[in-house]
Every structure is written in structure tokens, then in C-alpha cells.
Amino acid sequence: MDILILVVAMGALYAFLIVPQQRRVKAQQALMNSLEEGDVVVTNAGIYGAIAEVEDNIIWLEVAPEIELKVSKTAIVERVDDEDVDDDEDEDEMVDAEDGDA
């Protein structure tokens, strides 16, 4: 009886901890392999930018006109749509307008 409880506990541990982690790792690897020049991405530090160049494990991320950051490919968290970035800029302009700094 004790061995059955141990087996069930190990199965639950595997199902709730290991399987979801493996899915996250596969999704991150798929994202890293699909990155191309021109994609708009966000890093794990919250920096938005467009990919200017992709090397082996390095990405040159253009964050402003003629300003590029050299980041590790593993620092990329997600690809974002241009619409999402435009919405963020509109919100920033609204905040500035409220402060009277527009």
C-alpha cells in the first residue's frame, strides 16, 4: 500500500512539474529558432525592439533609430505585433499630455 502511494505521488509530481516545464522549454526553443530580421520582440528585461541582425546566439536589437543593442538570443521572451507596440506609444503620449509635458 505504501509503495502505491509513492508511485501515485511521483506520477503527480511528474505531471504537474516536469511536463509543463518541458513544454515551456520547447516553446522557447521554437521561438528562438524562428526569429528573423525585422521581427519586433521584447526581452526578459522588458526592452522592446526590432531585430536588425541575427547571428548564432546573438541578436542585434534596434531600440531606436541607429541605436542597436547586442543581446543573447535566450533573452528574447516573445514576439510582439506592431499593433501592440503602437498601443504602448499611444498610452505614453496620453500620460505626457496629462502631465502637461506634451
Image (cartoon, rainbow, N blue to C red):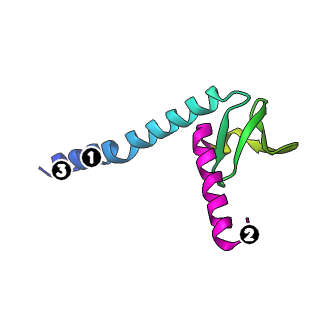
Answer few, some or many: residues within 10 Å of disc 3's Cα (few below 14, many 20 plus, some between 14 and 19). few
In the image shown, does 11 or 33 lie closer to the viewer? 33
Task: Reply yes or no: does residue 78 show up in magenta.
Answer: yes
Residue type at numbered disc 3:
Ile
Q: CA distance from mark 2 to mark 1?
A: 55 Å
Up-down relation of residue 78 to residue 100 (above or below): above
Instruction: Please provide percent x and percent y for residue 32.
Output: 63, 32
In the image shown, does 48 or 74 lie closer to the viewer? 48
Task: Reply yes or no: does residue 97 show up in magenta.
Answer: yes
Task: Give the residue number, with chain letter if any, for mark 2.
Answer: 101
Task: Give the residue number, with chain letter if any, for mark 1.
Answer: 12
Task: Give the residue number, with chain letter if any, for mark 3.
Answer: 5
Question: Which residue does the image show at 84% across and 43% down from the upper left?
Answer: 65
* Residue 46 in view of the camera: yes
Q: CA distance from mark 3 to mark 2?
A: 65 Å
Q: What is the quadrant of the C terminus in the image?
A: bottom right
User: Relative to 34, is 12 on the left or the right?
Assistant: left
Question: Which span of residues is magenta-colored?
Answer: 77-102
